[in-house]
Image (spheres, rainbow, N blue to C red):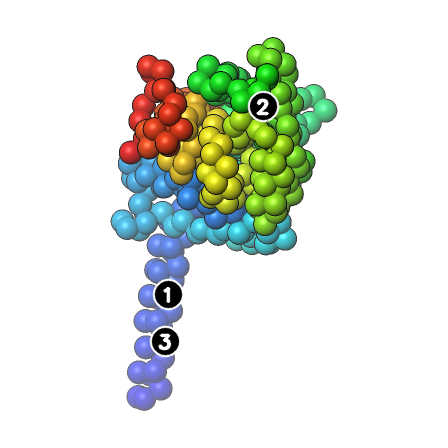
Amino acid sequence: MKYLRILSLLIVVIVIQSCSSSTKNNVPVVGFIDAFEDATISQAKTGFIDALKKNGFSEEQKTVVIKYNNAQGSIPTLTQMVNQFVAEKVDLLATSTTLATVAAIQKTKTIPIFQMVSPTPDRMKVTDAAGKAPANLYGTMEELNYIDTSFAIIPQLLKPKGAQLTIGMIYNQSEPQSADALQRIQGLAAKLNVKIIALPLNSSADAQLVTQALLNKGIDAFFANPDNTVFAAFETIQKSCDQKNVPIFTSEAGLVQRGAVAAFGADIYQWGYQSGLQAAQYLKTHKTDGIKLEMVKIRKRVYNPTVAKKYNITIPAGFEAVK
């Protein structure tokens, strides 16, 4: 009789586990990969999750499981994280910033990837010989045209200390979007009679040293281009620039909240939200029909009133003050 009771209990446990496992298997799993920790970039994750919630996929309601990993800027860790999600066969991958997107593309050709805070496939150098993007790549991308507007405003707002307006930049040679942005800006600067002094930076740990070197060259302003290293080291860059009374301009709206003067660029939260809408559509049907890479839709002209006042810069109409 005792053994029958034990056997009955075991059967109950097995049934409960089976039901639990079945329930869990019916809940879609999202593998979210952030390449590094950053206050601005993290807004994309918030937007992505909000878009899922609005479409019925909520962790609180247990209608989705979101497994989040942050590589903290480590490439080996990033690779390991992607491999883990691929091995787990998550329903989709969400990737924030170029490094995360490229790592995912390199590791899977079947799991749908929904990118955000990442450029076009050709700028990431992930297209095939025919110029086509990976078939499993979706989400939202950005091009370089918006940088022109962000950069062109600087000579309108600043007077040079010397004969020619001089703007300093930091770029990461290993990041395609950073090198491409520098090349584009150099071409635009020549047309605007602006001198560019650019120094390479491979690690945010060197940000203070490289920024100081730029400031010692007598720059009139610093331009923070779309570069993950610049994002990660922004507070360090800002502190050095403030000490030398050099304003920072940028093409990234999120950096204005952190101390840049003004920007015309994508709203990072909305960037993530837009990719999240695509991901939600896929989770509803597990089909990619009608889903494709889109250009980011919402860009903003924003300025920081406190910083503008500090540098006595008058912002033109059409720019929205950040809160």
Tell me which residue sits at (33%, 14%) in the image: 317
Image location of residue 302, percent across then percent down: 37, 25
Q: Quadrant of the N terminus?
A: bottom left
- Mark on residue 17? 1
Image location of residue 309, percent across then percent down: 34, 28
The numbered mark, 3 or 2, whose residue comes first in the sequence reads: 3
Tell me which residue sits at (36%, 47%) in the image: 64
Label 2 sits on residue:
166
Name the foreground residue: 190 vs 41: 190
Q: Is residue 91 visible?
A: no
- Mark on residue 28? none
Kind of element beneath mark 1: helix
Tell me which residue sits at (34%, 60%) in the image: 19
Name the foreground residue: 298 vs 67: 298
The numbered mark, 3 or 1, whose residue comes first in the sequence reads: 3
Label 3 sits on residue:
10
Label 3: few (<14), some (14–19) or many (≥20) C-alpha neighbours in 10 Å: few
Name the foreground residue: 201 vs 125: 201
| Image vertical order of residue 23 relative to residue 9, above or below | above
Kind of element beneath mark 3: helix
| Image vertical order of residue 78 relative to residue 306, above or below | below
Kind of element beneath mark 2: strand
| Quarter of the rendering containing residue 299 | top left
Tell me the amino acid under the disc marked 1: Gln
| Quarter of the rendering containing residue 126 | top right
Residues under labels 2 and 1: Cα distance? 67 Å
Q: How many numbered markers are drawn?
A: 3
The numbered mark, 2 or 1, whose residue comes first in the sequence reads: 1
Residues under labels 3 and 1: Cα distance? 10 Å
Residues under labels 3 and 2: Cα distance? 76 Å
Tell me which residue sits at (47%, 28%) in the image: 249
Name the foreground residue: 14 vs 191: 191
